[in-house]
Image: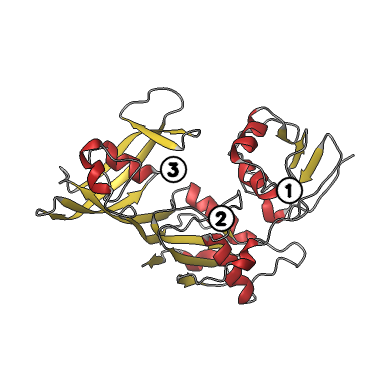
Amino acid sequence: MLLLLPVSLLFILDLTMETIKIGKNDQNLRLDNFLLKVYPQSKKSFIFKMIRKGYAKVNDIKKPFNYHLALNDVISIKFKIEKQLTIPNQWKQVNKAIKIVYEDDNLLVVNKQPHLIVDDYSHKNVDSLINRVKNYLFTTKQWDPSKENQFEPCLLHRLDTNTSGLIMIAKNHEIANFLNDKIKKHEIDKYYHCLVYGKLPFKNKLLSAYWFKDAKKNIVKISAVKQNKSFVPIQTQCKVLSYDVKNNLSNLEVKLITGKTHQIRAHLNFIGHPLVGEQKYTNKKYKNLNRKDKFQQLIAYKIVFNFKDPKNPNFDYLNNKIIRL
């Protein structure tokens, strides 16, 4: 017998099998992110293990962690995960301002400051960008989680903790699905300003390489060749804006073609020009210099909407829009 449970709440059951049916507000979420949302007390490594070993299946089929859930998918879980009665409403404790760059009835774009995490599924850090956003939307009466089937505002993309700049947040299910689709199709361009060491040997170039993430160490590796099937191709458009001869620093505009974890930071270091202030991806030549800076000089400064085939006329107003700091 199928047990349907509200996915906005957690539950305690003495069952060896638990099932959750995906509703409209959670379709298109990645499987791992959905399970982390539903079971906030569980560690990421445990969730990945559940998925990898097939203890958490979708429609009785083992799926990868990055599978995007569809409406009416049924997730079956073979044994208990750490859980509690309700998701902690930590956003209520975060009465801190957000820097709004753009807002309409569907979309919110904010300027994230460095050192602020965008989200924390462990709930160890109360202050996060998404919690600040939730507090703002609740205070301005745009969102009320107590209402039945209320959509929970969600991040459409992420920035590293020490990276600052523009982040898009969806206010409703329709815009979330629409813009997620556009991001996948590379119809939303994200531009960054960054400061790197050294003089680059080109003015404007599309950099290509292969990328691999070591999830256990939370570090990525870049290679000029595909070392094995785990390495995937990446592309980073890099344009030199200026060069400071005295300090041997280059000011760049970077456009993400692919959007992998730590891509800009690792890719620039791979070509011998690490970010100023970068700690994780910096070759020995610049390691000591980077200890002087509190965060890497990387700012997401511009978002450009370039819809090639708009599927939803309700959002055509965003096409060709440029949002910038």
Tag 3 residue? 261
Report, in whole angstroms, how far the alpha carbon at label 2 lies from the one at label 3: 21 Å
Task: Tell me where residue 245 appears, x and y as whole percent.
Answer: 9, 53
Q: Which mark is residue 60?
A: none
Tag 1 residue? 22
Residue at 54% x, 52% y: name it. 180
Q: Is residue 108 left or right of residue 208?
A: right
Q: Residues within 10 Å of mark 2 (few under 14, many from 20)?
A: few
Q: Secondary structure at mark 2?
A: loop
Q: Residues within 10 Å of mark 1 (few under 14, many from 20)?
A: many
Q: Is residue 246 left or right of residue 313?
A: left
Q: Nearer the viewer, residue 226 or 213?
A: 213
- Name the quadrant of the C terminus: bottom left
Tag 2 residue? 125
Instruction: Tell me the amino acid under the disc marked 3.
Output: Thr
- Name the quadrant of the N terminus: top right
Task: Tell me where residue 323 appears, x and y as whole percent.
Answer: 40, 66
Q: Quarter of the image holding residue 220? A: top left
Task: Tell me where residue 189 appears, x and y as whole percent.
Answer: 39, 54
